[in-house]
């Protein structure tokens, strides 16, 4: 009898712990939802404000449809998205408008976006970091 009770208690603990881990992963993904504005990008020798003097790039996640959209500081873009845990993959190619853009900001933004492999949401959901390998490549703030 005691063996049966202990077995049931053990199974209950295992089931509860599995459900808790799943909820935390789903919560991490749900933090992506919404619109984010770029405030840092790595790589270019041009200062951030020089790359984006008039308008900062934005990105918007619609996780129900697995879609991403936004503005590269000049052109609008949209495409498919795959998110699993903290891994993220932007399906290529993305659809884009074709306005003529000054400077290198759009090329830097879209080129860096293609290299992103994972993300991290910090500061109580206010900051989004895009990571390539183990290097933080882009940082966004929630709008």
Image (spheres, grey):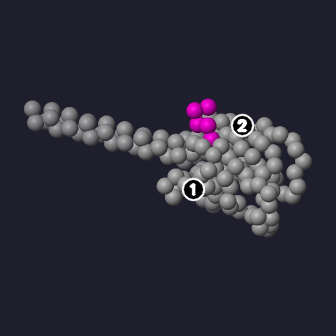
Residue 48 sits in quarter: bottom right
Mark number displayed over residue 79: 2
Instruction: Report the span colored magenta.
Output: 61-65
Residue at image position (57%, 45%) is: 32
Which residue was labeled with disc 1? 127
Mark nearer the viewer, 2 or 1: 1
Q: Residues within 10 Å of mark 2 (few under 14, many from 20)?
A: some
Given residues 75 and 3, the one toward you in this image is 75
The reply to whether the magenta stretch includes residue 69 is no
Residue 2 sits in quarter: top left
Which residue is at the far right? 100
Q: CA distance from mark 2 to mark 1?
A: 22 Å
Residue at image position (78%, 51%) is: 73
Residue at image position (80%, 40%) is: 96
Above or below, 5 against 117 in this view is: above
Q: Residues within 10 Å of mark 1 (few under 14, many from 20)?
A: some
Give the overall secondary structure of the magenta segment: loop
User: Residue 26 at x, y = what percent?
Assistant: 47, 41
| Residue 32 seen anywhere in this rendered image of the structure | yes
Helix or strand or loop: what does disc 2 sit on?
strand
Asked whether, in this view, residue 27 is left or right of residue 137, the answer is left
């Amino acid at each position: 009898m005691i063996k049966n009770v202990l077995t049931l208690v053990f199974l209950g603990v295992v089931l509860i712990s599995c459900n808790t881990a799943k909820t935390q992963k789903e919560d991490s993904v749900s933090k992506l939802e919404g619109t984010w504005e770029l405030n840092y990008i790595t790589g270019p020798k041009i200062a951030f404000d020089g790359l984006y003097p008039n308008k900062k790039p934005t990105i918007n996640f619609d996780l129900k449809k697995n879609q991403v959209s936004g503005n590269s500081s000049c052109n609008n873009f949209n495409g498919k998205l795959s998110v699993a845990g903290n891994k993220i993959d932007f399906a290529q190619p993305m659809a884009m408008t074709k306005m003529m853009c000054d400077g290198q900001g759009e090329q830097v933004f879209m080129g860096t976006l293609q290299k992103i492999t994972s993300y991290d949401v910090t500061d109580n959901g206010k900051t989004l970091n895009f990571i390539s390998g183990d290097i933080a490549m882009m940082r966004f703030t929630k709008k």
